[in-house]
C-alpha cells in the first residue's frame, strides 16, 4: 500500500484537470509510494473519458476515479474521505499545479513532524502575464486577499493556528487516522458547481483544530494556482468578496444577533460605500468598493444566521 493518496475533486474542468494530473505525474515520487483518487462531481464535459484514459495510461501515478452524483464539492470531498485508506491524504484542487518536489516534500514533512495531524504548504498564483498590473500593487490601496487563492507564511516551517491563518482546502495534508475525529465536510457550505460558495474548508479546519489537531506549515510543499482572467474583473471581484464574506460569518464565534444585523455592520457598509463614491483615483475607488462588498457580505451573513435560528426557516 502507498503512504500517500492525492485527492482531487473536479467539476467540468477537464482541461485544467489534465494540467493538474500532468504536474503530479511529473513530480518526483516518494520511496513510500503515492497514488491519485479523483472524484468527478456531476461532470458532463468529457471528464469521465479523460479519467478513464489516464487510469489506463502506463507510467503515471496509479489513478482511481469515482463519480459523485450529488452536486456540491463537499459531497465529493466526503466520498473521498470514505475511500482513502493510506496513512496520508493530500487535497489538491483541479486548478492547481504541483511543483516537482511536491510529493516528496509532503512525505518529508510528515516524517519530520509526527505530531502534526495536518500539514499545509505554500500556494502561489500561477501568473502568466495576462493579469492586470494592479494585482501586483503593494501600496496602501492594494487588493488583498486576491481572488486567486494564495497561502505563504514565509520560508521557515512553523505551527499554524487560526489567529495566524487557515489554508485553503486544496492545500492541505491530513493523517487519515484523524478523519473519524474531525468528521465530514459540511454539505451546507462550499461551492455547488462553479458558484461562489466557500468556507467548507475553513469550517473543517476549525473543527479539526478544536478537536486537538495540530497544523504544521511546510514551505517546501509548493503548488501554483491557475489565474482565471475573468476573476480579475471588478464585477466578479465584488460578487466573490460579498459571497465569501457572507459564508464566513458564524465560523469564528459570531453569535446570532438578537435585534437584527448589528448597527456597526450597517455603519461599516455605509462608510465604505461613501468613500468609494467619493474616491478620486481608480486604485482607491476599487479598494473601497471591495471593502463595501465585504461589509455587505457581513450583513448578508448575519441575516443568514437569523434565518437559520428561526424555527421552520432555513438559510
Image (cartoon, rainbow, N blue to C red):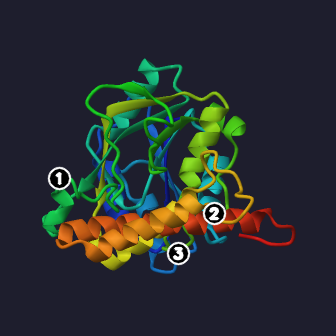
Q: Is residue 11 visible in this depiction of the protein?
A: yes
Residue most toward the right?
A: 311
Q: Earlier in the sequence, mark 1 or mark 2?
A: 1
In space, the residues marked 1 and 2 are separated at their CA atoms by 31 Å
Residue designated by label 3 = 43
Q: Residues within 10 Å of mark 2 (few under 14, many from 20)?
A: many
Residue 75 location, x and y as percent?
64, 62
Local SS, label 1: loop
Local SS, label 3: loop
Q: Residues within 10 Å of mark 1 (few under 14, many from 20)?
A: few
In space, the residues marked 3 and 1 are separated at their CA atoms by 42 Å
Residue designated by label 2 = 302
Residue designated by label 1 = 139
Q: Which residue is depicted at the point 63% across and 53% down?
A: 250
Q: Nearer the viewer, mark 2 or mark 3?
A: 2
Residue 11 location, x and y as percent?
49, 70
Q: Is residue 243 visible in this depiction of the protein?
A: no
Which of the two residues, 16 or 153, is positioned nearer the viewer here? 153
Query: In what quadrant of the picture does the C terminus appear?
Result: bottom right
Amino acid at each position: 500500500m502507498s503512504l500517500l493518496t492525492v485527492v482531487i475533486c473536479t467539476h467540468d474542468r477537464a482541461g485544467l484537470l489534465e494540467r493538474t494530473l500532468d504536474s503530479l505525474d511529473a513530480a518526483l515520487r516518494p520511496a513510500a509510494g503515492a497514488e491519485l483518487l479523483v472524484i468527478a462531481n456531476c461532470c458532463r464535459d468529457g471528464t469521465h473519458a479523460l479519467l478513464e484514459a489516464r487510469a489506463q495510461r502506463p507510467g503515471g501515478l496509479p489513478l482511481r476515479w469515482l463519480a459523485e452524483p450529488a452536486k456540491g464539492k463537499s459531497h465529493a470531498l466526503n466520498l473521498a474521505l470514505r475511500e482513502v485508506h493510506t496513512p496520508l491524504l493530500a487535497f489538491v484542487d483541479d486548478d492547481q499545479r504541483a511543483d516537482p518536489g511536491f510529493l516528496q516534500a509532503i512525505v518529508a514533512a510528515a516524517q519530520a513532524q509526527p505530531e502534526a495531524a495536518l500539514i499545509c504548504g505554500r500556494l502561489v498564483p500561477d501568473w502568466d502575464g495576462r493579469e492586470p498590473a494592479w494585482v501586483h500593487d503593494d501600496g496602501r490601496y492594494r487588493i488583498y486577499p486576491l481572488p486567486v487563492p494564495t497561502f505563504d507564511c514565509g520560508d521557515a516551517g512553523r505551527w499554524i493556528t487560526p489567529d495566524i491563518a487557515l489554508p485553503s482546502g486544496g492545500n492541505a495534508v491530513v493523517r487519515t487516522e484523524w478523519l473519524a475525529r474531525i468528521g465530514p465536510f459540511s454539505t451546507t457550505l462550499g461551492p455547488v458547481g462553479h458558484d461562489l460558495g466557500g468556507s467548507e474548508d475553513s469550517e473543517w479546519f476549525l473543527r479539526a483544530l478544536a478537536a486537538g489537531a495540530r497544523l504544521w506549515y511546510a514551505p517546501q510543499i509548493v503548488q501554483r494556482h491557475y489565474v482565471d482572467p475573468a476573476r480579475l474583473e471588478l464585477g466578479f471581484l465584488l460578487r466573490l468578496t460579498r459571497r465569501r464574506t457572507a459564508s464566513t460569518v458564524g465560523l469564528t464565534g459570531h453569535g446570532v444577533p438578537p435585534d437584527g444585523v448589528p448597527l456597526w455592520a450597517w455603519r461599516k457598509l455605509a462608510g465604505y460605500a461613501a468613500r468609494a463614491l467619493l474616491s478620486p483615483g481608480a486604485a482607491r475607488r476599487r479598494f473601497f468598493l471591495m471593502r463595501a462588498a465585504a461589509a455587505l457580505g457581513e450583513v448578508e451573513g448575519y441575516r443568514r444566521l437569523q434565518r437559520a435560528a428561526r424555527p421552520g426557516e432555513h438559510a
